[in-house]
Image (tube, grey):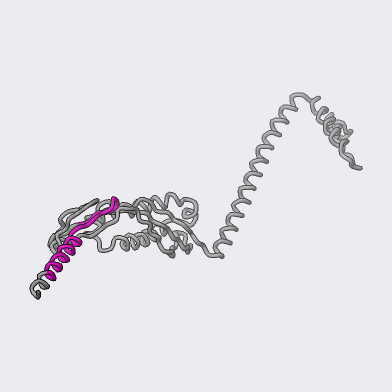
Amino acid sequence: METTYFDGLAYLIGIAAVVLLFWAAVYIFREYERGVMFTLGRFTRVCGPGFVIVIPIVQQVVRTDLRTFVEDVPTQDVISRDNVSVKVNAVIYFRIVDAERAIINVADYRSAVSQLAQTTLRSVLGKHELDEMLAERDKLNADIQEILDRQTDAWGIKVANVEIKHVDIDDSMIRAIAKQAEAERLRRARVINSEGEFQAAAKLVEAGKLLATQPNSMQLRYFNALNDISSERTSTVIFPLPVDLLPAGRKGKSS
């Protein structure tokens, strides 16, 4: 009876060992997952998706995710090329394109990409003026994305996109920018007024030359002016009188 008991116990232990061995040897990878397999510490292959058998103790598998990661770049203090201090934060989109390099060449690829994005953001924005940060954000995004993509290529990572979210400026600088914008609008208004005066003067010169060809046309202009004055309710009437009609004008002309 005692022998039968031990035989049954050994049988149960054997079944449990087989189940545990099977559980440790079987890996199932989803469509967006890959496994980097090592045999006795050496890289063997990239496996998955689907059903994969791994020899326990001899082989180990590290899972990787091929989906796009979204990494929020913390707010960075940046000094622009025109010595303006701003706070900038961004978001970066990247994914693994080579699972072997992402596991073997870098210890923690997510932390490495985040740190690299922070330093690159400060370096690139520091080469531009504040106006460029505010007006040419798409160009800056493309420049940062290109630099990150080139540097992370050795890690088997593809940086798909970089977006600068906020550019925060001090209140004193906001007031200075508002004054600058107001001065720029005044400058444009004065330039437009000057151009209008110049064009009006040119047209008056052309009109004077045209009226000089026909002396009687000036009389018509006088009557036109009187008609405009009479339509207004005013007690003072200014009548334009040609200088030639005055006696002194005639005497000076005759002499």
Q: Position of residue 19 (x, y in %)?
A: 18, 62
Q: Is 19 inside the magenta-drawn segment? A: yes
Most prominent secondary structure in the magenta stretch? helix
Q: Quadrant of residue 235?
A: top right
In the rendered image, the quadrant that contains the C terminus is top right
Vertical relation: 117 (above or below) 186: below
Q: Residue at x 13, y 71 (%)?
A: 9
Q: Is residue 57 left or right of residue 95?
A: left
Residue situated furthest left in the rendering: 3
| Residue in the foreground of this view, choosing between 175 and 227 | 175
Q: What number of labels is visible?
A: 0
Q: Quadrant of residue 28?
A: bottom left
Q: Residue at x 54, y 63 (%)?
A: 173
Residue situated furthest bottom in the rendering: 2
The answer to whether one can see residue 151 in this image is no
Q: Is residue 129 left or right of residue 241?
A: left
Q: Position of residue 59 (x, y in %)?
A: 15, 61
Residue situated furthest front in the rendering: 1
Highlighted magenta segment, given as a residue range: 8-36
Q: Quadrant of residue 157?
A: bottom left
| Residue in the foreground of this view, choosing between 60 and 230 | 60
Q: Is residue 115 left or right of residue 1?
A: right
Q: Position of residue 241 (x, y in %)?
A: 86, 34
The answer to whether one can see residue 202 in this image is yes
Q: Is residue 213 left or right of residue 52?
A: right
Q: Position of residue 148 (x, y in %)?
A: 33, 55
In the rendered image, the quadrant that contains the N terminus is bottom left
| Residue in the foreground of this view, choosing between 173 and 48 | 48
Q: Residue at x 32, y 59 (%)?
A: 113
Q: Is 56 inside the magenta-drawn segment? A: no
| Residue in the foreground of this view, choosing between 98 and 137 | 98
